[in-house]
Amino acid sequence: MEVEIKFRVDFETIKEKIEGLNADLIREEFQEDIYFSLPPKHLLRIRKITNLGEVILGYKEIKDERNEEFDEIEVKVEDFDKMRDILKRLGFEEDVWVKKHRYVYKLGRITFELNRVEELGDFLDIEVISDDIKKAKEIIWETAKALGLSESDVEPRLYQELLEEKKKIT
Amino acid sequence: MEVEIKFRVDFETIKEKIEGLNADLIREEFQEDIYFSLPPKHLLRIRKITNLGEVILGYKEIKDERNEEFDEIEVKVEDFDKMRDILKRLGFEEDVWVKKHRYVYKLGRITFELNRVEELGDFLDIEVISDDIKKAKEIIWETAKALGLSESDVEPRLYQELLEEKKKIT
């Protein structure tokens, strides 16, 4: 189980704080994700990591109300356009694109994903892989507090939802 | 467009004849395909080529009555089990496994796929990639006749269909 909490942050400030915890910068990614329409709490996307030349098909089921607990399967695929074409032919409809500049840090069992998301702003996902969800959330919150983050900084909505809401407004 | 005609053959006899035409042996494959249930004339499968360590997701739409004209999209994926799991989670049901030992030969624009199919026997697919379907079939038949094959050797049914029929009988 992937347990993660998403916070709204100021990119530069939080980057300094994460590095101040001596977390290791694992990689930098420029991601372009296309999401397909699925029933609520189910996600299907193809991710292109443009700077690394990788393409990943990802499926997620969300297990809780606050979008913090994910059952996830990811598989690398060779070609973005062909994968997209197959899903379209199978009847899946494209929903939104999510484009991010991401820094990934590791600190013990914790993964930090610091994201600058096009049209949406800056976010930090703090993630722990564990089947002990209670314990995972304790670790996440302990770390969040060390970074000066609180409940009021939490963004429970998915990027997909935030972009859909934005589309409706504009 | 992938144009191909499938013939029932005797493996060793036809192999000698293909080699007698000076076709080039391109590769040998041991394939394990899992097919998923889709509406008629639509195919979805994951192919594991065990001897080459390759996995390919394939989608086909059949454009004619005799299963000779295919619109095909294939994409390599990194992991058979994860791809299978994603398709199952998306609601696709597994139908049949098709297991083959295949020799692939090339002769100009023609591809020969000589298959020993588990539970079904020996088959030769003669294939030409072309949008001129009439011309492609002329080339295929000219070659088939040079190999001593005739209309009575044609097997219009898909492997998937042949195996489903077999399942019903046994």
Image (cartoon, coloured by chain):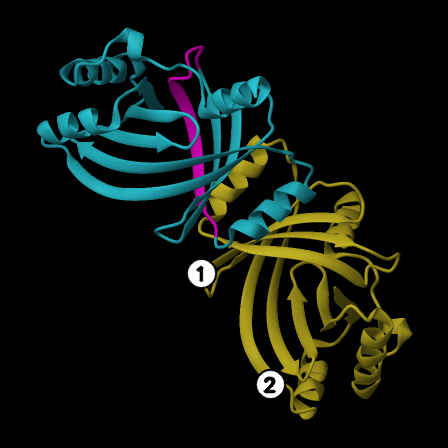
Chain colours: A yellow, B cyan
Considering the numbered disc 2 on the image, is that residue within a helix, a strand or a loop?
strand
Q: Amino acid at mark 2?
A: Asp
Q: Quadrant of residue A93?
A: top right
Q: Is residue A61 left or right of residue A135?
A: left
Whole-number angstrom distance, CA of label 1 to CA of label 2: 22 Å
Q: Quadrant of residue A17?
A: bottom right
Total tally of numbered discs in the picture:
2
Instruction: Decide: is A84 above or below A24.
Output: above
**What is the magenta range?**
B64-77
Residue at point 26% right, 36% down?
B104
* Residue placed under numbered mark 1 in the picture: A53
Q: Quadrant of residue A108?
A: bottom right
Label 1 or label 2, whichever comes before in sequence order = 2
The crowding category of the residue bearing disc 2, from other C-alpha atoms within 10 Å (few below 14, some 14 to 19, many at least 20), is some
Instruction: Decide: is B62 above or below A19.
Output: above
Residue A96 drawn at (x, y percent): 67, 46
The chain identifier of the residue carrying mark 2 reads: A
The chain identifier of the residue carrying mark 1 reads: A
Instruction: Decide: is B37 above or below B141.
Output: below
Q: Is residue B1 visible?
A: no
Q: Amino acid at mark 1?
A: Gly
Residue B142 drawn at (x, y percent): 17, 14
Q: Is residue A56 left or right of residue B55?
A: right
Residue A30 drawn at (x, y percent): 54, 64
Q: Does the magenta portion include B41?
A: no
* Residue placed under numbered mark 2 in the picture: A24
| Same chain shared by disc 1 and disc 2 | yes
Mark 1 touches mark 2? (CB < 8 Å): no
